[in-house]
Amino acid sequence: MTFDGEAFVDEMREELQASGRTLDQADWVKRTEQGEATKEDLVAWARQHYHGVTYHTRRVLSAWVVRVPYEMTDGIIDNIAEEVLGTTSKSGFGHLHWLFEFTRALGAPDEVITDATPNVDAMACSSFLYRLALQEPWHEVMFGGVLAIENQIPPAYIKAVAGFKAHYADILQPDDYAFHTIHITVDEDHGGHVGEFAEQHLDTDAKRRSARAAYFTGAELTRRCWDSMAECAW
Ligand SMILES: [Fe+2]
């Protein structure tokens, strides 16, 4: 029987969904939808996300871009340009800027983020992404990073943004959560092509097993990083 890449990807996504461990089920997302997340909770999420994912994205992508087939470099360079300069979103700034706009609007000085000690989950998440980009077979970032993390971001932020609009209008204006809306817009077309990619590149059982492991690990480590909302004050 030939390998069906779309089915491979769909099954993994369904399995993650059924486990309840998708990012859109994270504690802060649910509590934001209900209007129950405090300013401290939202900054607590933002600062671990900063250490676990956002701060490192440009380096992870830059490491990956030298290892992929030449034809794939356009998309990755686009992605880096958006991360650093906001070129696709035309937002005028990179994503780190917009993350700090969010935490500033919530009243947190930047040092609450920059001087925070990354927790174990954030360290695990960023370390895993570097390992994939630098050491594992080049195609694994597509499963452990793109499919597991990037593709999960839009549905999670759509819920969060709905919560901001419904319950936080007195604190947060749309520009304050541009970090979230930009990620909904720029990431929305990713994911559809991963099945095709799997079919093309996962040509052995061993590659399929390691792609699967990368997918569930990337998703779970990011979820743990997101759920780490302990002790944030300023
Ligand atoms: Fe980003």
Image (cartoon, helix red, strand yellow):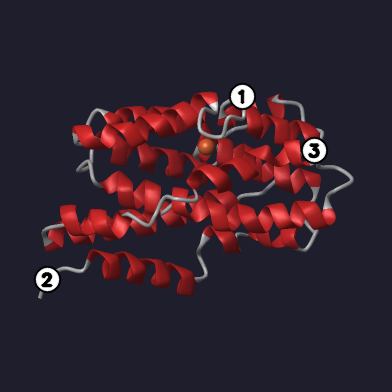
Graded by Cα atoms within 10 Å as few (under 14), some (14 to 19) or many (20 or more), the crowding at tag 3 reads some
Q: Quadrant of residue 13?
A: bottom left
* Residue at (75% x, 57% y) in the render: 163
Give the residue at mark 3. 106
Indicate the position of residue 44 as horizontal and vertical percent values.
68, 43
Q: CA distance from mark 1 to mark 2?
A: 46 Å
Amino acid beneath label 1? Gly
Q: Is mark 2 within 8 Å of ligand 1?
A: no
Which secondary structure lies at badge 2?
loop
Give the residue at mark 1. 92
Graded by Cα atoms within 10 Å as few (under 14), some (14 to 19) or many (20 or more), the crowding at tag 1 reads some
Query: Can you see residue 52?
Result: yes
* Residue at (35% x, 36% y) in the render: 75
Q: Earlier in the sequence, mark 1 or mark 2?
A: 2
Say if 170 sits above or below 102 in the image: below
Q: Earlier in the sequence, mark 3 or mark 2?
A: 2
Which corner quadrant holds the C terminus? top right
Horizontal side of 218 relative to 165 (left or right) equals left
Q: Are marks 1 and 2 in contact (CB under 8 Å)?
A: no
Q: Earlier in the sequence, mark 3 or mark 1?
A: 1
Q: CA distance from mark 3 to mark 1?
A: 21 Å
Say if 85 sits above or below 160 in the image: above
Indicate the position of residue 142 as horizontal and vertical percent values.
31, 48
* Residue at (68% x, 54% y) in the render: 160
Which secondary structure lies at badge 1?
loop
Give the residue at mark 2. 2
